[in-house]
Image: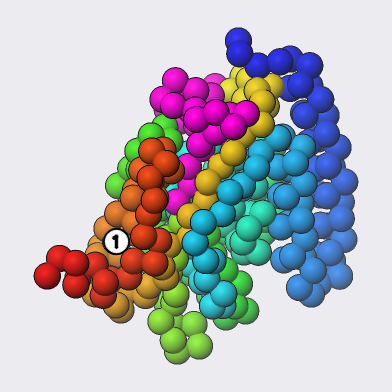
């Protein structure tokens, strides 16, 4: 075991204390109503990252268009506070996540929309997503549909991007690809050997993985905001999924290798390069 049990216990205690207090405060804010209930999760996630020794390094410019659909790769349960600390929006998550210990609470505090694949709930979920978009609330989707090992990006599922076909206020929905890369441990590049200590995928057991991860040193996660697009610019859902996957994969590759990246690439500039 690489981590320190003492450090893990300290961070776990701080996290539980913070979450218990925050859950009560968020419940009060939901009862009161207003924008504070949407802003509070961002503060909470920033504090979670502080408790767990995670630093977020931002590259690129986050879309300020409301609403925006942020489309990201997925590596770890830590992705929720990482993105939640930067985007005052709602996650679109699988229904079963709501029942997960600890991380179900994380998702609920972020006002997540839990998507059930049963056809009987399709209309209800569509209406809920429309309510968020009509209010101008950003949405966050992990487009791979599962978590990966952090060394590569899995194919994006076009079905998960059906929300991009909505036209809130009669305008095309802005979509921004986002890359997440777990880069450094105590300021030293992780490499393929250390990254699985933070990437949670496959049949890894959750509790033991969390305990070991939070017992390690300070982690630096790089988040790259790529140039926003709309589905109309690309011609359809499949093209949008492919475009977002390519931009996100480029970002992850640049984070792993330390190479510079032209973050502001747009579909138009890419077409010019190809020509």
Would you say 169 lies left or right of 30 here?
left
Q: Residue at x 48, y 67 (%)?
A: 69
Answer few, some or many: residues within 10 Å of disc 1's Cα (few below 14, many 20 plus, some between 14 and 19): some
117 inside magenta stretch: no
Disc 1 is placed on an element classified as helix
Q: Position of residue 223 (x, y in %)?
A: 52, 51
Q: Residue at x 51, y 37 (%)?
A: 182
Q: Quadrant of the C terminus?
A: bottom left
Q: Which residue is mark 1?
A: 243
Q: Please identify the quarter of the rendering in which residue 4 is found.
A: top right
What kind of colouring is applied to the model shown? rainbow
Q: Residue furthest bottom?
A: 170
Boundaries of the magenta span: 179-206
254 to 13, vertically: above or below: below
Query: In this rendering, is residue 87 above or below 211?
Result: below
From the top left corner, tell me how far across and down residue 186 is, in percent: 62, 29
* In magenta stretch: residue 197: yes
Q: Name the residue nearer the viewer: 88 or 49.
A: 49
| Residue drawn at the location 83% of the way across and 49% of the way down | 22
**Residue 38, percent from left and from top:** 72, 66
Q: Is residue 121 visible?
A: no
Residue at the location (87% across, 55% down)? 25
């Amino acid at each position: 075991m690489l981590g320190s049990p003492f450090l893990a216990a300290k961070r776990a205690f701080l996290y539980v204390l913070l979450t218990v207090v925050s859950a009560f405060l968020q419940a009060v804010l939901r009862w009161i109503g207003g924008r504070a209930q949407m802003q509070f999760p961002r503060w909470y996630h920033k504090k979670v990252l502080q408790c767990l020794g995670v630093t977020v390094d931002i590259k690129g410019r986050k879309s300020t268009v409301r609403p925006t659909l942020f489309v990201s790769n997925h590596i770890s349960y830590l992705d929720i506070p990482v993105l939640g600390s930067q985007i005052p929006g709602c996650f679109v998550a699988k229904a079963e996540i709501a029942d997960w210990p600890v991380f179900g609470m994380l998702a609920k505090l972020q006002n997540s929309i839990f998507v059930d694949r049963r056809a009987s709930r399709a209309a209800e979920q569509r209406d809920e997503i429309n309510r968020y978009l009509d209010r101008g609330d950003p949405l966050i989707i992990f487009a791979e549909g599962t978590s990966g090992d952090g060394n590569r990006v899995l194919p994006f599922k076009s079905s998960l991007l059906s929300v991009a076909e909505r036209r809130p206020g009669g305008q095309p929905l802005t979509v921004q690809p986002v890359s997440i890369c777990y880069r450094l441990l105590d300021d030293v590049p992780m490499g393929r050997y250390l990254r699985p200590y933070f990437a949670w995928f496959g049949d890894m057991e959750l509790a033991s993985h969390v305990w070991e991860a939070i017992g390690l040193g300070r982690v630096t996660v790089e988040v790259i905001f790529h140039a926003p697009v709309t589905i109309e610019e690309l011609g359809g859902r499949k093209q949008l999924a492919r475009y977002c996957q390519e931009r996100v994969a480029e970002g992850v590759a640049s984070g792993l290798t330390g190479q510079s990246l032209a973050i502001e690439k747009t579909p138009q500039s890419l077409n010019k390069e190809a020509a």
